[in-house]
Image (tube, grey):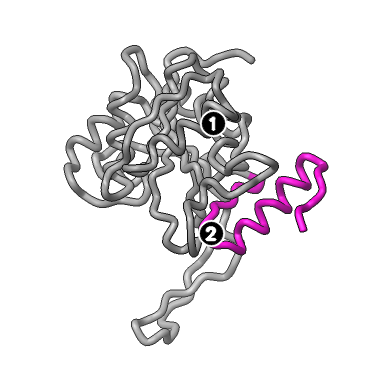
Amino acid sequence: MKKIPGLGIVIVAGGSSTRFGGGNKLFADLGGVPVFIHSVRTFAPLTEPGRTVLVVPRGETEHFREALELHAPEFGVRLVSGGAVRTGSVKNGLRALPPGTEIAAIHDAARPLASEDLMLELVRAVETFHCGAIAAERMVDSVCRTDQAGRIVENVSRENLWRIQTPQVFPYAGICACYEELGDVVLTDDSAAFRACGREVVVVENLSCNLKLTTRSDLDLLRFQYASRTGRAVPQ
């Protein structure tokens, strides 16, 4: 596989898994390996060993290290501790990327089905337009806005509306500068940080399943999608 010069990858695995209902969701089994290993195996081969950083919860470093040594030892993944919120975790991951990084890709480990082709499209968009690029899915449902009591106050056109996903890819110096400028502002989306500093972001439409693991029911859907892709039987 051809590697992308100057690419650094930050895989964010520092969440609390509160809505999963017990245990770290990223260690749930998906095709015989922990959920987070899929993102490592998909994206780490696109860059040199040592240029992939996995951001993990404080106190769980050894647990993640053992899983990496068992399932993905060849990629030289660097482990760093996350922050109190996602913003801090991303900052820690960006700071851990080695010298020579020109493009930074940020991905949520809870999205194990994101593809190599999607990452390549995003990197090409950054190189072509010299801005940020994010994976996203077109909004197909009808959309409304309500008041605090749940009463509909407005029907919103779904035209040009997107569901934001990861990976998200940026010029490395640019995304680092944005996070430093914003300080302790809490954000759940990296493209929001990039845009808050006056920089442009383009959308790359993703037509493949890129479900985020949040609840136990999501795990069933992920296993079904994974089985469909690989031809393996769906676990009972």
User: Helix, strand or loop at disc 1?
Assistant: helix
Q: Is 93 a magenta residue? A: no
SS under mark 2: loop
Residue 58 drawn at (x, y percent): 32, 42
Which residue shows up at 62% across the image and 56% down it?
219
How many neighbours does mark 2 have within 10 angstroms: few (below 14), some (14-19), or many (20 or more)? few
Where residue 96 appears, as percent x and y from the top left, is 31, 25
Check the picture and name the quadrant holding the N terminus: top right
Range of residues picked out in magenta = 207-236
Answer left or right for 151 relative to 222.
left
Residue at x 26%, y 39% (from the top left corner): 198
Vertical order, 206 against 234 (above or below): above
Residue 92: quadrant of the picture: top left
181 on left or right of 189: left
**Looking at the figure, which quarter contains the C terminus?**
bottom right
First in sequence: mark 2 or mark 1? 1
* Type of amino acid under label 2: Glu
**Which residue lies at the image location 42% right of the left edge and 84% below the top edge?**
150
Tell me the residue that label 1 is attached to: 40
Closer-to-camera residue (64/108): 64
Q: Residue at x 35, y 51 (%)?
A: 188
Can you identify the residue that label 2 sits on?
A: 159
Q: Nearer the viewer, residue 119 or 26?
A: 26
Between 53 and 208, the one nearer to me in the picture: 53
How packed is label 1: few (under 14 Cα within 10 Å), some, or many (20 or more)? many
